[in-house]
Image (cartoon, helix red, strand yellow):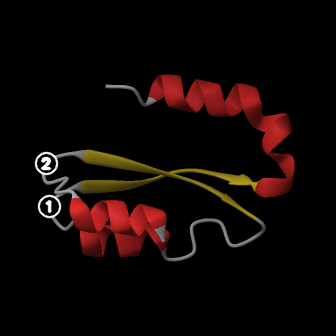
Amino acid sequence: MPVYSFLDAHDLAGKTVNVFVTHEGSRFSNTVGTIQGLEPDARVQEGLAVQGGSVSDEEQNIRQWVKDHQN
């Protein structure tokens, strides 16, 4: 909900949003679609989904993903 509140308060038109989530099996669920609905003029992309129980094992992959997606 904090993310959705942020999106309600900010216009990201023309921006690219790379969605990063942690989960326990649902991956992105409908998060990407919800963000697209809230920010229809932004480019919303499915980014990286990391299983919550393995986050500590994924540090290098997460760091690399962030580095690869910087503007």
Which disc number belongs to residue 14?
Answer: 2
List x then y, in percent, for residue 18: 41, 47
Q: Which of the 4 image quadrants contains residue 21? A: bottom right
> Does dot 1 land on a helix, a strand or a loop?
loop
Which disc number belongs to residue 41?
Answer: 1
Residue appearing at x 39%, y 26% in the figure: 70
Q: Nearer the viewer, residue 19 or 2?
A: 2
List x then y, in percent, for residue 36: 30, 68
Residue appearing at x 13%, y 48% in the figure: 14
59 horizontally vs 37: left or right: right
Q: Residues within 10 Å of mark 2 (few under 14, many from 20)?
A: few
> Does dot 2 land on a helix, a strand or a loop?
loop
10 horizontally vs 50: left or right: left
Name the amino acid type tagged 1. Asp
Q: Which of the 4 image quadrants contains residue 60? A: top right
Which disc number belongs to residue 54?
Answer: none
12 horizontally vs 69: left or right: left
* Relative vertical location of residue 45 with respect to residue 65 in this rendering, above or below: below
Q: Which of the 4 image quadrants contains residue 44? A: bottom left
Q: Quadrant of the C terminus?
A: top left
First-in-chain label (1 vs 2): 2
Residue appearing at x 27%, y 75% in the figure: 37
Q: CA distance from mark 1 to mark 2?
A: 6 Å
34 horizontally vs 55: left or right: left
* Relative vertical location of residue 69 with respect to residue 26 in this rendering, above or below: above
Name the amino acid type tagged 2. Gly
Q: Are marks 1 and 2 in contact (CB under 8 Å)?
A: yes
